[in-house]
Image (spheres, rainbow, N blue to C red):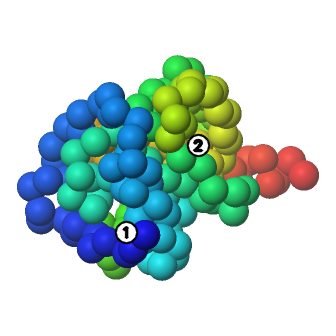
Amino acid sequence: MGIRKIVTRGDDVLRKKSRPVENFNKKLWNLLDDMKDTMYSADGVGLAAVQVGILRRVVVIDVGEGYMELVNPEIISMEGEQFEAEGCLSCPGESAVTKRPFTVRVKAQDRNGNWHIYKGSGLKARCFCHEIDHLDGFLFTDRAASDEEKLKAFEDKKKLEDND
Ligand SMILES: [Zn+2]
């Protein structure tokens, strides 16, 4: 167990595609344990292996609903949309409003290779999308909403509030 160094924007590795995990062995478990420690020590809600310089499809998440490990995760369905401010442990000090689905379903393996299906809405959906994006070399700023989208989201929200 240990805390690893988090790679920051400007390092090319963040733009690379991560490879699937094939061996569910001690090496993977060590990586997961270190990623967990690293995420909590950095006060993050999610971390992808590439952020500690390992190009494997491994993600850890905790949005306040419990700790999760996702190995070889894939989004299998998306519904709705949301526009919220997002940041990233690899981009300290940066934030942007992103366009994300409101609800996603994800299939992923656990540390023993068993498949599970998870559903998340709101922050959890954003986090699933954000971390899985890292595995394909995308950063949250690639999903930044346009000014038109932000304006429309703001007006839709206002309409809802006015109707209350
Ligand atoms: Zn990130």
Q: Is residue 41 above or below residue 15?
A: below
Q: Is residue 53 visible?
A: yes
As drawn, is 116 to the left or to the right of 89?
right
Residue 48 coordinates in the image, percent (x, y): 37, 52
What residue sits right under mark 1 in the picture?
A: 89
**Badge 1 amino acid:** Leu
Position of residue 142 in the picture relative to residue 65 (left or right) = left
Q: Nearer the viewer, residue 100 or 68?
A: 68
Q: Residue furthest top?
A: 76
Among the 4 quarters of the image, the one containing residue 105:
top right
Q: Earlier in the sequence, mark 1 or mark 2?
A: 1
Mark 1 CB lies closer than 8 A to ligand 1: yes
Secondary element type, mark 1: loop
Q: Residue, x 28% and y 42% (percent of image)? A: 56
Q: Residue at x 41, y 36 (%)?
A: 24
Relative image position of residue 81 (x, y in whole percent)? 57, 36
Q: What is the x, y in percent for residue 68?
A: 60, 49
Q: Are marks 1 and 2 in contact (CB under 8 Å)?
A: no
- Near mark 1 (Cα within 10 A), the count class, few <14, some 14-19 or many ≥20, is some
- Where is mark 2, residue-wise? 125
Left-right relation of 39 to 123: left
**Residue visible at 53% across and 47% down?**
69
Percent coordinates x, y for residue 161 in the rendering = 80, 54
Q: Amino acid at mark 2?
A: Ala
